[in-house]
Amino acid sequence: MGKDYLRQLLAKAIWHIAGSGIQDGRREGTIRNHGVPQGECVQAGPLRIREGIIMWNTGLFLSQRFDWRTPVGVYDGLHAEFDFDFDPAPSEPDFDGLKVSWGKRNFVNPPYGRDVGLWVKKAWEESRKGKLVVMLLASRTDTAWWHDYCMEGEIRFIRGRLKFDGQTNSAPFPSAVVIFRPPSMMKDIKSTFWSFLRG
């Protein structure tokens, strides 16, 4: 069994131990003194071992920034379809979007920090009040908020990686559009669908 294989196995084992800490928002850290000779580097999934230091690549899981500005083309296309009248999470807000009542037809690109689950929960709650909410989100299909709320809506996965406004490179995460329609709208859609089937 070669040394490289053993080092990769060690990296994977440490990743399993540290993984939950990375996913819940602790985005930086090193685990030192694990015996990789100076000058050597071993890559194992999200971990990189170099000169005795094991580092995790947080870009695979969480963005290092929260203010990912919506690409103009993405917003324009969605606005043409849904005719938005309110944005509870603007780039430079002068109010707390989690505490105010939202509009009738909302576009939400929330801050991509640890509170993103609260934004998704709020969006779902506002839709239960008869409002339309369209969200641009990182596609985090392993999270509780994704399963609890996003899967109750319409999900449109975006192919490839978005290049957010003001960024040189594409985002380090996949994205999706999640649509929460009010119950009355869903009832109309179902009625139209069954009317179509009946001819």
Image (cartoon, rainbow, N blue to C red):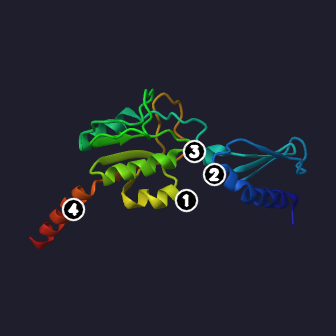
Q: Amino acid at mark 1?
A: Asp
Work out which residue is located at the far bottom of the displayed protein and give it.
Answer: 198
- The x, y position of residue 68, in whole percent, is 49, 35
* CB-based contact (under 8 Å), mark 1 and mark 2: yes
Q: Is residue 35 above or below residue 187?
A: above
Q: Which residue is mark 2?
A: 23
Q: Which residue is mark 4?
A: 187
CA separation in Å, label 2 and label 3? 9 Å
Q: Amino acid at mark 3?
A: Arg
Crowding at label 3, few (<14), some or many (≥20) Cα neighbours within 10 Å? few
Crowding at label 4, few (<14), some or many (≥20) Cα neighbours within 10 Å? few
Of the numbered discs 3 and 1, the one sitting upstream in the chain is 3
CA separation in Å, label 4 and label 3? 34 Å
Measuring 86% from the left and 42% from the top, which residue is drawn there?
51
- Numbered label attached to residue 114: 3
Q: Secondary structure at mark 3?
A: loop
Q: Amino acid at mark 4?
A: Lys
Of the numbered discs 4 and 3, the one sitting upstream in the chain is 3
* Whether residue 191 can be seen here: yes
Q: Is residue 62 above or below residue 149?
A: above
Q: Amino acid at mark 2?
A: Gln
Q: Which residue is mark 1?
A: 142
Of the numbered discs 2 and 3, the one sitting upstream in the chain is 2
Measuring 51% from the left and 33% from the top, which residue is drawn there?
67
Crowding at label 1, few (<14), some or many (≥20) Cα neighbours within 10 Å? few
Residue 92 lies in quadrant: top left
